[in-house]
């Protein structure tokens, strides 16, 4: 009987130690996620881009960015577990005039209703296929591979609507104080990037998780 009680006690003790270690590790991790180190605070806080009452998570990217390309699998895995709990938006950044052509391509694909069909292949074509898709002619040929007529491409690519979205993306890039890509903006006030995560995409995702929880707790307090 004593042996049985000792076994139960030992099991409970091990469970308690495991719980304490897990809690301590979580607290230590959170303690490291400080403003100015793991993320920056955007001031003033920006207006939301969607009508959703969920926490907004903005992925800032550029198709020509190899770091953005390598970050994509991490984003996809994270969204598999979190898409229902947050409002996810992409922002094709415009940090200089050379980037605007890809921003225009993004909003052209959106306007033509093929954004999700073409998003990954465009990344792949540039970084895996080593294709130079940096002007309207090469992009038109790429879109044609997805069934887009050249006339429809030109009409949409240079449309007033798409041009307006490119200007808005440029303005948002400035307002969100984006200095490089990829970057993730949480709740329109927290900015983090691989630089804040010492180059680790896995750690960047951990920081995003932390900031989503932080924002959710603030909204519920």
Image (cartoon, rainbow, N blue to C red):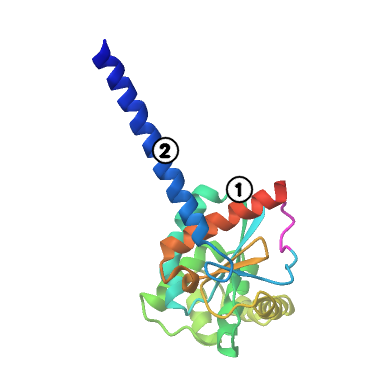
Q: Which residues are magenta?
A: 48-53
* 46 lies above or below 65: above
Q: Which residue is mark 1?
A: 85
* 201 lies above or below 13: below
Q: Residue at x 49, y 61 (%)?
A: 32
Give the foreground label among 2 and 1. Answer: 2
> Looking at the image, is mark 2 or mark 1 earlier in the sequence?
2
Q: Position of residue 119 (x, y in %)?
A: 51, 67
Q: Residue at x 28, y 20 (%)?
A: 6
16 or 208, nearer to the observer: 16
Q: Which residue is mark 2?
A: 19
Q: In the picture, which quadrant includes the N terminus? A: top left
Residue 146 sits inside the magenta stretch: no
Q: Position of residue 212 (x, y in %)?
A: 59, 55
User: Hey, which residue is sitting farthest top in the picture?
Assistant: 1
> CA separation, marks 2 and 1?
27 Å
């Amino acid at each position: 009987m004593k042996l049985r009680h000792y076994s139960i006690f030992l099991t409970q003790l091990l469970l308690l130690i495991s719980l304490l270690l897990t809690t301590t590790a979580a607290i230590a991790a959170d303690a490291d996620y400080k403003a100015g180190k793991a993320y920056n605070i955007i001031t003033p806080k920006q207006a939301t881009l969607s009508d959703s009452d969920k926490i907004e998570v903005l992925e800032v990217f550029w198709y020509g960015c190899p770091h953005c390309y390598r970050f994509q699998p991490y984003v996809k895995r994270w969204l598999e577990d979190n898409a229902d709990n947050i409002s996810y938006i992409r922002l094709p950044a415009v940090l200089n005039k050379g980037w605007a052509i890809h921003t225009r391509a993004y909003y052209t694909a959106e306007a033509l209703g093929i954004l999700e069909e073409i998003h990954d292949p465009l990344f792949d074509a540039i970084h895996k296929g080593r294709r130079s898709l940096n002007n309207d002619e090469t992009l038109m040929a790429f879109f044609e591979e997805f069934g887009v007529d050249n006339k429809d491409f030109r009409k949409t690519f240079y449309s007033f609507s798409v041009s307006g979205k490119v200007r808005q993306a440029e303005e948002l890039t400035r307002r969100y104080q984006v200095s490089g890509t990829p970057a993730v903006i949480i709740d329109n006030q927290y900015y983090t990037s691989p630089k804040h995560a010492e180059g680790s995409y896995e750690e960047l995702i951990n920081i995003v998780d932390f900031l989503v929880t932080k924002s959710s707790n603030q909204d519920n307090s």
